[in-house]
Image (cartoon, coloured by chain):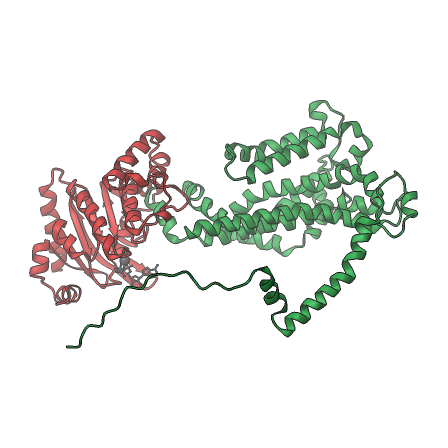
Amino acid sequence: MADAVLFDKIESRPPPRSEGGPLDWIRERFFGSVTNTLITIVCIYLLYVLVPPIANWLLFSASISGTDRSICDANPDGACWTFIKVRFDQLIFGLFYSANPDQLWRPITVFAVLAVMIAWLVTPATPNKREVGAFALLGFPVFAYALIEGSLLGLPSAPTNEWGGFMLNISLAYVGIVASLPLGILLALGRRSELPVIRSLSVAYIEFWRGAPLITVLFMSSVMLPLFFPAEVDFNKVVRAMIAITLFEAAYAAEVVRGGLQAIPKGQFEAADALGLSYWKKMGLIILPQSLRISIPGIVNTFISLFKDTSLVAIIGLLDILKTAQNASRSIEWKGFDIEAMIFAAFVFWVCTYGMSRYSQHVERSLDRSKRS
Amino acid sequence: MATAEQERAAGENNAANTASNRPMIEISGLNKWYVDFHVLKDINLNIGKGERIVICGPSGSGKSTLIRCINRLETHQEGSIIVDGTELNDDVKHIEEIRREVGMVFQHFNLFPHLTVLENCTLAPVWVRKIPKREAEDTARKFLERVRIPEQAEKYPGQLSGGQQQRVAIARSLCMNPNVMLFDEPTSALDPEMISEVLDTMVDLAESGMTMICVTHEMGFARQVADRVVFMDAGQVVEIQEPEGFFSNPQSDRTKLFLSQILGN
Ligand SMILES: Nc1ncnc2c1ncn2[C@@H]1O[C@H](COP(=O)(O)OP(=O)(O)OP(=O)(O)O)[C@@H](O)[C@H]1O
Ligand SMILES: [Mg+2]
């Protein structure tokens, strides 16, 4: 028999340190090889060529004082933010409110409530999330409509077809999001249903709406829809756009939700069944809470594109922020300042979508963490 | 068929032993196919109240399929399954009623990862049995104590070891106050050192008089608690015996081969 071979116990020791601080890090990352060095140099050169003039035009030489174009005309090397300042109310709140500045408190209140509500929902560990969420889904749209439209509360009426500016984009996106998600969930469940009729209807719906570009859907909704209804039924344009966006977006939401459903192991369904939970309780208490959490990044993603797509309503004659900006830069007073108008509209969209994408990244990270534990 | 005769006799025998004369579970003429594949072949099996059955057999012999038919996780095409007087058929009311009365423990635990241990245990009692939340929580804590993990109630399943998760799964089923418990290889996904803690819980449960049907390869457990051992192969019941006889004097060649393989002699 062979002799046993014994080994001494080995103590753990710390991992070998890579020496050097930030300077070494820079040298390694940016100048580690000839190619790296070349790329770094080209990039620095491009930054040097591009950034100073852009920053100069945007900020340092830009004009913002005054209330008419004279100051901008005197300063052709800088952007004309005076234009944006003067037309700000119109760009954000639309024609009605810029014409009635004493009523501006109404949309501002709505925006403030919206901001608080969203902050409440996305901040971890705030209490009463469920109640706030229910308000966001049901109460807030009614509240916002009552206050912005006004006649229900005895305030001067701002009819929906005079809604405009960024307020209109937000209204469309909000209704689109809040209404399309539940519809999308139902469609996703329908697509996985064991009942052939429900399944085929869901598939047909999803494939139909996914096949059409939103712009044609909007166009059809304004041209076709009235043909199917008697002349007395006066769908207003905003409601029509909301319906079109919701129906359209639900198909996309459904596919994202379905992806999340597919990621839930079969054992979860079986355990819920074995405990005697009915279909809706199984879905509502066990499956959807898990799958929606997984789908949040994808859902936010579709909402970001929905949000930007709201500017397509210009096709049916609504004056959203983009169209308002365009019109303003073609008005006699501010002709020629198209770039400023577009940059401002883009910036407003960017701030909102960037916030959404940061939120979804945050959710993704916390999902990763919970998976690891 | 000799085996069918045998098992019917055994079932009647057992039913006579228990107070009520109606078996808890009556399976007769059960046949099931996966498309063309005949996975369960003419199964007849009566299980009395309080009886403990161990089902064993080679992989793919249909053990899981059989017990999953009992709570309708799988549907059968022929024959009948009657659980505590209720026949399993397409009637959703019957299915839900039976699922309330029949608890199931899975190989991979299948706890709900987004709920705490306590919530896992109270969810079905509250939503299915409509028991007030406080009462359900008290019951849940009692059962968690019984499976010896009362201190983990506020944790999430992902924070527990496999053995602890399986004991939570057992407690979760018990919280529904079932008449029958089904176990599908409850220990085969566990590391060896955790198997005994789960088996201890199951022995404890068996001693309390629960009707149990366990698919398991833990022959020590079968010896200790089973009233009868059911051996399945290729979709059919091959042999039913009391554990004593099953291990010392198996009748069929297939049983002998199987036992020699798993007992290693
Ligand atoms: N959903 C299914 N579709 C088709 N065939 C299936 C399905 N589920 C199981 N089978 C087949 O049915 C047979 C019995 O499966 P079952 O899971 O009941 O076996 P088992 O005895 O539990 O085996 P194991 O010990 O491996 O768990 C196997 O041959 C399996 O491949
Ligand atoms: Mg199995």
Q: Residue at x 10, y 51 (%)?
A: B9
Q: Position of residue A139 (x, y in %)?
A: 59, 31
**Would residue A349 appear left or right of A303 to someone viewing this image?**
right
Q: Position of residue B118 (x, y in %)?
A: 34, 38
Most distant residue in the front direction: A20
Q: How many discs appear? A: 0
Residue B135: quadrant of the picture: top left
In this structure image, what is the colour of chain A?
green
Give the quarter the ligand 1 occupies: bottom left
Q: Position of residue A22 (x, y in %)?
A: 59, 60
Q: Residue at x 76, y 57 (%)?
A: A51
In-front residue for pair B67/A307: A307
Q: Residue at x 36, y 45 (%)?
A: A272
Work out whether A153 lies above or below A336: above
Q: Quadrant location of the C terminus of chain B?
A: bottom left
**Would residue B193 appear left or right of A39 to someone viewing this image?**
left
Chain the render paints red: B
**Would residue B179 appear left or right of B130 to someone viewing this image?**
left
The answer, for residue A251, to whether it is visible in the render is: no
Residue A143: quadrant of the picture: top right
In-front residue for pair A51/A373: A51
Most distant residue in the top direction: A154
In-front residue for pair B9/A277: A277
Q: Position of residue A268 (x, y in %)?
A: 38, 49
The answer, for residue A106, to whether it is visible in the render is: yes
Q: Quadrant location of the N terminus of chain B?
A: bottom left
In-front residue for pair B44/B106: B106
Most distant residue in the bottom direction: A1
**Would residue A344 appear left or right of B127 to someone viewing this image?**
right
